[in-house]
Amino acid sequence: MFEKFFSSIGFEGAEIQTTVHPNTFSPGDTIEGLVTVIGGQSDQQIAGIELTLFVFHDNEHRSDSDFSYYDEELNQVMLKEISEIKANEKKECRFKMVLTKNHPTSSESVETYIQTKLLVHNGVDPEDKDIIIIK
């Protein structure tokens, strides 16, 4: 009875996991991966899966900010293959993202990651974050 309510507030709701192998790339490469969605206690409607490629910059001086770090959004892919996930069901879908030829390489102050967000109708959107290395 309360399963749908608990799922809608994020308790025992659907989970998302992104897998990228290998996790080391060069600028200009194509990132290929797999998104796995696992259903929670009740069925949930899915609006989509949003994958966003970010570069985290640390210790860079920015005149327009009081912070020494920021996340730069570089690319976004929206997957619509999964529109519903049933309770305890497991679904997978593949994705591709292309790195630009001038993508910054990884260092102590630069980190690239993919943030995956499961867009759930009338509920909390589960997220996943996967760091990738750019050489």
Image (cartoon, rainbow, N blue to C red):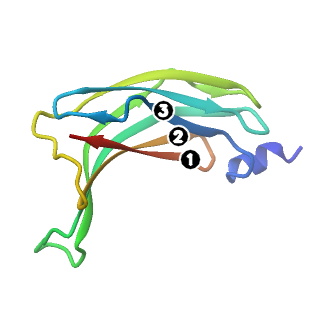
Quarter of the image with the C terminus in it:
top left
Q: Nearer the viewer, residue 100 or 50?
A: 100
| Circle 2 residues within 10 Å: few <14, some 14–19, many ≥20 | some
Quarter of the image with the N terminus in it:
top right
135 displayed left or right of 17: left
Q: What residue is shown with label 3?
A: 19
Q: Residue furthest right?
A: 1
Q: Residue at x 48, y 32 (%)?
A: 19
Answer with mark 1 or mark 3, whichever residue precedes in sequence: 3
- Indicate the position of residue 47 as horizontal and vertical percent values: 53, 33
| Circle 1 residues within 10 Å: few <14, some 14–19, many ≥20 | many
Say what amino acid the circle numbered 1 marks: Asp
Q: Nearer the viewer, residue 115 or 78?
A: 115
Q: What residue is shown with label 2?
A: 119
Say what amino acid the circle numbered 2 marks: Leu
81 displayed left or right of 98: right
Q: Indicate the quadrant where residue 99 lies.
A: top left
Answer with mark 1 or mark 2, whichever residue precedes in sequence: 2
Cα separation, mark 1 vs mark 2, equals 5 Å
